[in-house]
Amino acid sequence: MIERSNGKPLKVILIAAMSENHVIAKDGNLPWRLPNDLKHFKDATRGHAVVMGRATFETLSGPLPHRENIVMTTRRDWSTPGVVVAHTYDAALRIAAERSAPQNESVYIVGGGVVYAEAIQSADELDLTRVHTTIEGGDATFPDVDPSIWRRVANADFPADDRHTFGYSFERWVRC
């Protein structure tokens, strides 16, 4: 467990949208249009540190505003304005702990698949949007959620509509 500068533990939360078959990206992008999920993501992560892989960052138009952007990469020569570079997951968490405002107890892991696979091993919570479709030929996937390790504590279902390509559920999971 990583401690923040105030001595309190840093809570690690993975936040992701995934299809029923765990796909999180296709052709380098989200394979759906879900404005409520985007709003949920923005509201949850605003003001917090976010950790992402370089490939995920490069799909964005720039750093996510109102967040401490920490980008993981193995490329030692990579940098870009507005982000802090970390070369390991542990280094990313240390940076998040050091740079988090005292009132922020959490860091959000926002992708991609390789980062999620490492982070789920020690995460405290999962904030998932389950998109009710199957996506074939995805680029990246979210790891399996083992029910012997994780317990779902919240679930809200929403149907597809004129603004949302597919039905979806917001789920919150905590480590058992």
Image (cartoon, rainbow, N blue to C red):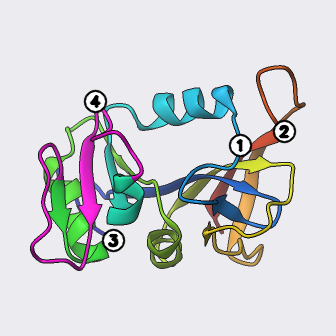
Q: Amino acid at mark 2?
A: Phe
Question: Between marks 2 and 4, how big is the CA–CA gap?
Answer: 29 Å
Q: Amino acid at mark 1?
A: Trp
Residue on which the image places disc 1: 32
- Crowding around mark 3 (Cα neighbors within 10 Å: few <14, some 14 to 19, many 20+) is few
Residue on which the image places disc 3: 1
Q: Mark number for residue 66?
A: 4
Question: Between marks 4 and 1, how big is the CA–CA gap?
Answer: 25 Å
Which label lies toward us, 4 or 1?
1
Q: Mark number for residue 166?
A: 2
- Crowding around mark 1 (Cα neighbors within 10 Å: few <14, some 14 to 19, many 20+) is some
Question: Between marks 1 and 3, how big is the CA–CA gap?
Answer: 35 Å
Q: Amino acid at mark 3?
A: Met
Residue 156 in view: yes
- In reply to whether residue 77 is colored magenta, the answer given is yes
Q: Amino acid at mark 4?
A: His
Q: Mark number for residue 110?
A: none
Quadrant assignment, res 86: bottom left
